[in-house]
Image: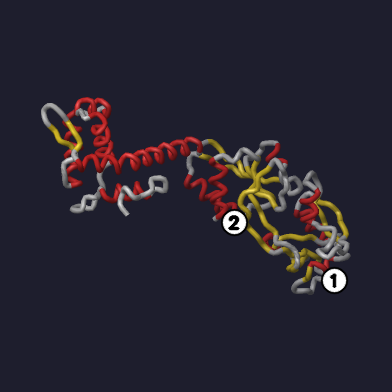
Amino acid sequence: MSAREADPNNGDLIILVLAELIDHRGGMPVEIRELECFLVLADELHFGRTAERLYLSQSRVSQLLQALERRIGGPLFERTSRRVALTPLGKELVTSLRPAYAALERAVDGAREYATLMKGTLRIGFQGAASDEILRAVAAFQERNPNCLINVCELPLTDPFGGLRRRMVDAAVVLLPVAEDDLVVGPVFSRHPQTLAVAKGHRLAGRSTIDAEELAGETLIAYSGPAPGYWRQAQAPTQTPAGALVHRGPEVATLQEGLSLIAAGRGTMLICRPTAAKNDRADLIAIPVTGIPDSALALVWRRGEDTPSVQAFAEYLKG
């Protein structure tokens, strides 16, 4: 494919034009300044005006042009004491180079604008303990965006969306499900099987796994607070997938409160496998549960406020 056949919209032309401007003797690409000088001179057809536009001396313009002609291997301009005109080779290069150079300028301008926007502070909220995925995303974001300070803060388990609505954070990592009209659900990650946390003397304590239908008749400890009903129902369902009754137990504000009530024999609790592992206790047992959806986290932000910094952090969470 030649430079003229390439599609300037997908970057092929930029690659091909620059590839064709390789010095085959040394293998070094031409200087961008040489290309800029060539294009301005092709517009002005006058060394003096070209020098003025580029804030260079006329001798420097001549040096840049001669260097480019040496790399390409032929004259680009016909120069006399009266006139400057493009040669057929120069016309061919102008035709191929202009869209590529314009695309490069747009790319640089876009990067400059993006860098300007990626400043300030990005506030990320999370429920409970920050997972390894969150910490890796924070570290990667901070390393690649040193001008944007990332702050993290813990959100109450019982109020997953309040920090966003009170503008305490710019985005929040929360337990699914999320069905809020004013919020956008970004990348979903950290999917893990559910376990049932029970006291060591519980009737199911000796089981290696249990089916969701075996939750019938159990008492599940639930979260209190302003979280929407559908969200609370997902964390502590009141019926099995087949519709059998599951009793609603006491409500708690934190995971540790729930674990204490479990140990006291007040009920059981659904928690994901990594959370169960991090909160291992001698008086509790976490039994894998089949037949219910995995636990999962998602990055959520206010609708219409997906800033470049939020978008960048979301990409790191995608992993």
Q: Are marks 2 and 1 in contact (CB under 8 Å)?
A: no
* Disc 2 from disc 1: Cα separation: 33 Å
The picture places residue 281, in percent across and down from the top left corner, at 73, 63
Residue 132, which numbered label?
A: 2
Question: What residue do we see at 24% from left, 25% from top?
Answer: 52
Label 2: how many residues lie within 10 Å, few (<14), some (14-19) or many (20+)? few
Q: Quadrant of residue 170?
A: top right
Q: Nearer the viewer, residue 54 or 265?
A: 54
The picture places residue 162, in percent across and down from the top left corner, at 72, 41
The picture places residue 159, in percent across and down from the top left corner, at 75, 45
Q: Nearer the viewer, residue 26 or 48?
A: 48
**Kind of residue sitting beneath label 2:** Asp
Question: What residue do we see at 18% from left, 42% from top?
Answer: 69
Q: Secondary structure at mark 1?
A: loop
Question: Which residue is the site of mark 1?
Answer: 203
Residue 319, which numbered label?
A: none
Question: What residue do we see at 79% from left, 74% from top?
Answer: 206
Q: Nearer the viewer, residue 262 or 14?
A: 14
Q: Quadrant of residue 40?
A: top left
Q: Where 48 falls versus 156 (above or below)?
A: above
